[in-house]
Amino acid sequence: MKHEFHDCKPTPNKEKFRFQRQLIGNKEEIKIIAEFKKASPSKGKINPDASLEHYISLYDKYADGISILTDEEFFMGKIEFIKMAKGMTEKPVLAKDFYIDPVQIQRAVFYGADAILIIARILNETMIKELYNLSVSLGVDSIVEIHSEEDLRKVMKVIDPEIIGINVRDLSNFEIDKKILHDLLKMIPENKIVIAESGIQKPEELLELKGKVDAVLIGTAIMSSENPGMFLKELKRWSG
């Protein structure tokens, strides 16, 4: 059955911009965005047999927000995971994908996403503005991801995002450079919600991020943990 997404709008009872509100707080308490992904381009298969129901039940207990990979080719994701997760939790859900076309955002909203991802590195200024404005009109948050000063300049030239994600992983070679986070934090306006993405392996690493970022997005470390529940519990302990 072919779905038409062009008339896609939030349902009347759907609360708008839920992800943003969930992340607002003081920077002394880091919010946790837990990610569900079975594989990645950098790691290959991480946890290919992972149960969405099991992980969402853990994320519902310990996380402030949930990120779900919907890309099938590189992450073993499915857009249907969004609808399934929304039936299991009240926590806001980010549909994470390589968004390059408005129809992808409309599809994400159709399946119940509360937020989408805009990756500055893969988009020109025109597309950043178009995708961002569409998400605003549909009542879903955009996490605008940057990796460099060039990305930040490109973004701020055309939009004024509420949420900025700093990905310390270089998408071209998958290398991680944590210095990027601290360099870019100095350039981002103080009124922005900032998410630290990629590279966090241990819960105690959150200690050095307190007072600097509003949230962390963690996927691989959770998905590859032998005891994800304990890992999440420790994340909560170190986040506050």
Image (tube, grey):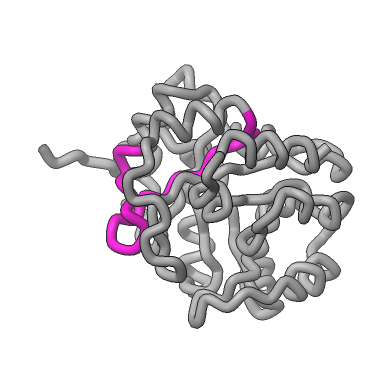
**Residue 133 in view of the camera:** no
| Camera-nearest residue between 106 and 178 | 178
Q: Residue at x 47, y 73 (%)?
A: 122
Q: Is residue 187 above or below residue 164?
A: below
Q: Is residue 236 left or right of residue 9?
A: right
Q: Residue at x 49, y 48 (%)?
A: 223
Residue 54: x and y, percent? 43, 30
How many dots with numbers?
Answer: 0
Q: Residue at x 63, y 74 (%)?
A: 176
Residue 12: x and y, percent? 45, 19
Quarter holding the C terminus? Answer: top right
- Furthest residue in direction top, as rendered: 13
Q: Is residue 111 above or below residue 168?
A: above
Q: Is residue 46 above or below residue 9?
A: below
Region in magenta? 62-81
- Furthest residue in direction left, as rendered: 1
Q: Is residue 146 left or right of residue 185?
A: left
- Verify whether residue 125 appears in magenta: no
Residue 65: x and y, percent? 60, 37
- Verify whether residue 80 appears in magenta: yes
Q: Residue at x 61, y 43 (%)?
A: 33
Quarter holding the N terminus? Answer: top left
Q: Is residue 239 above or below residue 37?
A: above
Quarter where residue 100 is shown: bottom left
Q: Is residue 199 left or right of residue 1?
A: right
**Residue 169 in view of the camera:** yes
